Amino acid sequence: MNSLLRKSLLKKSLLAAMIASLPMAQATAEEVLIGLITKTNTNPFFVKMKEGAQEKATELGAKVSSFAGRFDGDTDSQVQAIENLVAAGAKGILITPSDPQALAPSVQRARDAGVLVIALDTPFTPPNVADATFATDNFKAGELIGEWARAQMGDDAKNAKIALLDLSTANISVDVARNQGFLTGFGIDTKNPNINRDEDDPRIVGNDVTQGSEEGGRRAMENLLQKDPSINLVYTINEPAAAGAYEALKALGRQDDVMIVSVDGGCPGVENVEAGVIGATSMQFPLQMAALGVEAVVEYAKSGVKPGATPGKAFFDTGVELITDEPAIGVASSTSKQGKTKCWG
């Protein structure tokens, strides 16, 4: 599906998910202040999200005020940003929560003040802490790379030695969904699907944390290789972690006999698919995610209508697409060349 068709379908689905409501006090688009709060302002994913929000706000005549944590996990900065936006009269807040549980009281106060709160990328715990969630289906993203890896390994999948390079040990929803999706796609019993690290399949060498960074990926890969040098399949939470894992493997001369799979769809990650560093990655669409969020806030300011969810899901699904140059039978995918036309960062 090309990007223009996807955009059209997403818009139609969003509008279809909105339910009729009695009009509230009218507000023009020029009066609409929208807050965007991301986990950091350096991660290319969030940079593209900011770009998407600003472009759509300019198109609609609204205003975006952007805030970010100083680092991934900086809850205090996000709390302060919520308070500042409520005081400034924001109609809506788009937020990628650094701690989906700790931020709940601040979000509730914003909603009590009449502010529409939409989670982007990372759902709150529970999801109904926010009015809506616009996100990648992270379980599906993980499942796609798990299915691809299983198909590529064929009969050797039963002898896989798997390293799981997660984000952290905090069981953050995105981290868990991608990890558990990958294991499910690969055919491994996940035990409790709501937490990582409780599996007992002998093919799993172990989990380690990366904080989503290249350095973290390198360190985690080194740790797990010390535990079992025969690792032949590596799952990573994102593409920077995958790049770090590759460097650790390369230092041992094992870069050509270990398969790496990941999630993100950033341009550097797609280039790494083309270069053979990453076997396959699941692409998500942060610009679209933020743009749709801005549209939803402007609509809410005009009519009081809140966005809904994709039918059959607890959130509005902004899409995911497998990118690989080694297609597998039964797993739909696009090439790295095609991925370059829609990647971000």
Image (spheres, rainbow, N blue to C red):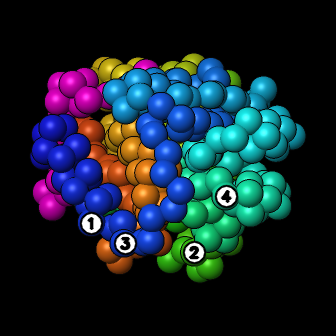
Residue 213 seen from this side = no
Counting from the top left corner in percent of width and height, residue 140 is at 38, 61
Q: Which residue is mark 1?
A: 16
Could you tell me which secondary element the residue under label 1 belongs to? helix
Q: Which mark is residue 314?
A: none
Label 4 vs label 2: CA separation? 35 Å
Q: Residue at the location (57% across, 63% down)?
A: 131
Q: Which residue is mark 4?
A: 114
- Name the N-terminal-most of marks 4 and 2: 4
Counting from the top left corner in percent of width and height, residue 52 is at 42, 30
The residue under label 1 is which amino acid type? Ala
Q: Which mark is residue 193?
A: 2
Label 1 vs label 3: CA separation? 8 Å
- Labels 4, 2: front one: 4
Could you tell me which secondary element the residue under label 4 belongs to? loop
Position of residue 174 relative to residue 68, above or below, is below
Q: Which residue is mark 3?
A: 19
Label 4 vs label 3: CA separation? 18 Å
Question: Magenta residues?
Answer: 327-345
Q: Residue at the location (32% across, 74% down)?
A: 311
Label 3 vs label 2: CA separation? 32 Å
Check whether the beta carbons of the residues at disc 1 and disc 2 lie within 8 A of each other.
Answer: no
Number of numbered discs visible in the structure rendering: 4
Check whether the beta carbons of the residues at disc 4 and disc 3 lie within 8 A of each other.
Answer: no
Residue 331 falls inside the magenta stretch: yes
